[in-house]
Image (cartoon, coloured by chain):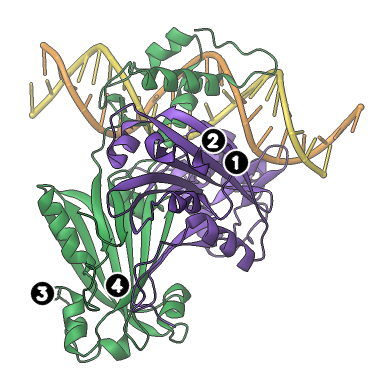
Chain colours: A purple, B green, C yellow, D orange
Amino acid sequence: MNISRGPGQAPKYQRLAADLRRRIMAGEWQAGEALPVESELESQYGVARNTVRLAVDVLVNEGLLVRVQGKGTYLKDHPVLDHHAYLSPAAGAAATPLTPPSLSYAREAERAGRKLTADFQMLIVRATTDITDRLRIAAGEAVVLRRVLRHMDGEPWSIEESHYPVALAASTALMDPDPVAGGDEVALGAAGHVEIGCVDELAARMPNPEEAQWFQAGPGVPLLVQLRTGFTGKGPIRVTETRYCADRNRLVYSLGERKE
Amino acid sequence: MNISRGPGQAPKYQRLAADLRRRIMAGEWQAGEALPVESELESQYGVARNTVRLAVDVLVNEGLLVRVQGKGTYLKDHPVLDHHAYLSPAAGAAATPLTPPSLSYAREAERAGRKLTADFQMLIVRATTDITDRLRIAAGEAVVLRRVLRHMDGEPWSIEESHYPVALAASTALMDPDPVAGGDEVALGAAGHVEIGCVDELAARMPNPEEAQWFQAGPGVPLLVQLRTGFTGKGPIRVTETRYCADRNRLVYSLGERKE
DNA sequence: GGTGATTTGTGCGTATGTATT
DNA sequence: TAATACATACGCACAAATCAC
């Protein structure tokens, strides 16, 4: 293929990227397989190494390729795990507490035959307005932050941060620096706060450096962010932000009448 | 700030990126404001232009900065529009057709005081297995593909592709090469197919080049992808994939009992 | 409307560092 | 140890877009 640049043409590195993309899509290499080394691509296409790197940069930032120093450049290969964020209750069922995400998460992992582990932290922090607005408390007010860092088969998987008003968490197990058996909602329920609804806000963005490092996510891998505000009949009782590495996770919502 | 590289230190361009990130977070520049030009950063930090560009590349790929040829490098600034993907029905309400996404989309835009326009295409194509699996039809079977390209205030906003089995769409308005007044579900309802539930699968990924061009999305801007499979009591009747530019959109699901 | 200055974009060459095999 | 392959860093030149004049 000739990628010499004529007038009105795209830049060389973009045309090179496009040709590599075509070859990838055409199945020239298998998932996880190594591409030709940079010097090989230089001579194949007759360009400078810089240009090869610019082209590969493009595909890395699209999430198609990963580079490993000293080894080579590989086609990305990731299994995707579905996580059921919501299952509408069976028809005719009374208003029931919503399925706790942590439980369904564990079930999901088990069903997929994967091993889920978690690290837990409990902090008391001054909340950002993102959180206080949704909890309808004063800006800068302290909240209980319960953080769960999840690993799947040893691979970093998700970051879940649940925020509770201190007034609500006081004198419940939420003040303990340990996970609550059965999930945080058990502790809330014992205190008379039963969640009957929630609002999920879904967004996607690129990770910041700390997040990228924790997730071991290279360039081209966005985060899928779920911000769930839980309500009782009286008002909001918690805000849970869960961040997923989008190349290994999908969120599933089953809505309306149940099928199957 | 001295960014000369010592042993065991991060590379210069990464340390430069980190320092610029710090200055950005510290509020040294306003949203939309221009950063110092590359030559200025060269001399500020005493590095080669190449190194400046590598550092800025990092922040561009994080979605923090945008570069404009001939002008400069700017702090990104984007208003976010919430799109209500689902509102759980009021308590006690009978099973009702789900809120059509296209309608709520238009309502959302209007509420935000923005002008929504759309281009429409109707095609008959052989579906990928992604689609046929969910529609429970044979792989490679033809489907009706109805595509809506949406613009908000002239800015590219979302791509919505609805797939219907040809057998189902036959002898309905879905075969017409025009949008159906009131939404596709009106045409389906008229044929006796009333959607009573759906499954949404949410994912995030980087756009491919065509998508990036259409969305006018630079590097660092992922797509938020919603794949909705709609069901009647008998089985799936449609699969709608909607792709949103994640820097301008969020999806909102209101679940369980309604608040307010 | 055109010209030149400014600023980012593209492309080349070279050298050296670091991780893997 | 040596060879290989990607990572970092410098330098240079010109192209293309924008803007002030």
Q: Amino acid at mark 3?
A: Ala
Which x, y percent locates residue A99?
Answer: 45, 62
* Occupied quadrant, residue B130: bottom left
Which residue is labeled 1 in the image?
Answer: A178
Q: Amino acid at mark 4?
A: Ser
* Distance between the alpha carbons at the discs numbered 1 and 4: 46 Å
Q: Is any part of residue B159 visible from this angle? A: yes
| Residue at x-position 23% and y-position 39% | B79
Crowd band around label 3 with a 10 angstrom C-alpha radius: few (<14), some (14–19), many (20+):
few
Crowd band around label 4 with a 10 angstrom C-alpha radius: few (<14), some (14–19), many (20+):
many
- Pair 3/1: label in front: 1
The correct choice, above or below, for A85 with respect to B197 in the image is above
Which residue is labeled 4 in the image?
Answer: B162
Give the letter of the chain under mark 1: A
Q: Amino acid at mark 1?
A: Asp
Which residue is labeled 2 in the image?
Answer: A122
**Mark 4 in CB contact with mark 2 (< 8 angstroms):** no
* Distance between the alpha carbons at the discs numbered 3 and 1: 55 Å
Which residue is labeled 3 in the image?
Answer: B181
* Distance between the alpha carbons at the discs numbered 4 and 2: 44 Å
**Residue sitting nearer the eye, B112 or D16:** B112
**Mark 1 in CB contact with mark 4 (< 8 angstroms):** no
